[in-house]
Image (cartoon, helix red, strand yellow):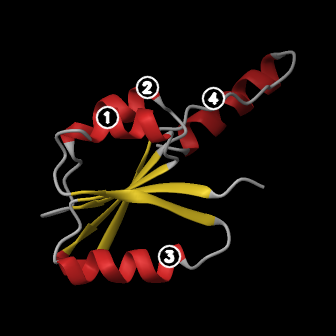
Amino acid sequence: MDPIRILLVELRPNLLRDVTETFVGRADDVEILGHLDSRDRLTAEVRRQDADLVVLGLADAEFPPECRELLDERPRMRVLGIAGEGRRAFLYEFQPRVVPLGELDHERLLWAVREAAAGR
């Protein structure tokens, strides 16, 4: 299995970045691709290095607008936001999925409506 390719972005303080690089980077199934000090080159670096996951420093829980293009372009990518100097984390993802339901009859249609609404 290929390692999980991680790009670290704006992890502050530096101790948070160092701890993340050390502990996460030790795992056999993880490859730390590097660290960006700003989000300016985020999309370009993710594309260039073919990252699977971005670990991003946040000021709060609000979705980072710089990541919208990434998630639109790469629906299976995830962004792990770390805030409060490492005390809180938020996982942002956009993973469309298709669930084949087979041929519909009136009972199966009602079941499908209920299943779709259950995720509200």
* Marks 3 and 4, how far apart at CA: 41 Å
Q: Secondary structure at mark 2?
A: helix
Say whether disc 1 or disc 3 marks the residue closer to the N-terminus.
Answer: 3
Q: Position of residue 36 (x, y in %)?
A: 25, 54
Q: Amino acid at mark 1?
A: Thr
Against 63, is 76 above or below? Answer: above
Question: Taking the image as drawn, is residue 20 in sight?
Answer: yes
Q: Residue at x 78, y 55 (%)?
A: 1
Q: Kindly identify which residue carries mark 4.
A: 113
Could you classify mark 3 by the number of other residues whose Cα lies within 10 Å: few (under 14), some (14-19), or many (20 or more)? Answer: some
Q: Residue at x 21, y 46 (%)?
A: 64
In the image: residue 91, left or right of residue 101:
left
Say whether disc 4 or disc 2 marks the residue closer to the N-terminus.
Answer: 2
Residue mark closest to the camera, 3 vs 4: 3
Q: Amino acid at mark 4?
A: Val
Say whether disc 1 or disc 4 marks the residue closer to the N-terminus.
Answer: 1
Q: Position of residue 42 (x, y in %)?
A: 28, 41
Asked where in the image residue 114 lies, by quadrant, the reply is: top right
* Marks 2 and 1, how far apart at CA: 10 Å
Would you say the residues marked 3 and 4 are in contact, meaning their CB atoms lie under 8 Å apart? no
Q: Kindly identify which residue carries mark 3.
A: 24
Q: Residue at x 63, y 29 (%)?
A: 113
Could you classify mark 2 by the number of other residues whose Cα lies within 10 Å: few (under 14), some (14-19), or many (20 or more)? Answer: few
Would you say the residues marked 2 and 1 are in contact, meaning their CB atoms lie under 8 Å apart? yes
Q: Amino acid at mark 3?
A: Val
* Marks 1 and 4, how far apart at CA: 37 Å
Q: Kindly identify which residue carries mark 2.
A: 73
* Marks 3 and 2, how far apart at CA: 26 Å
Q: Position of residue 47 (x, y in %)?
A: 43, 33
Mark sitting on residue 43: 1
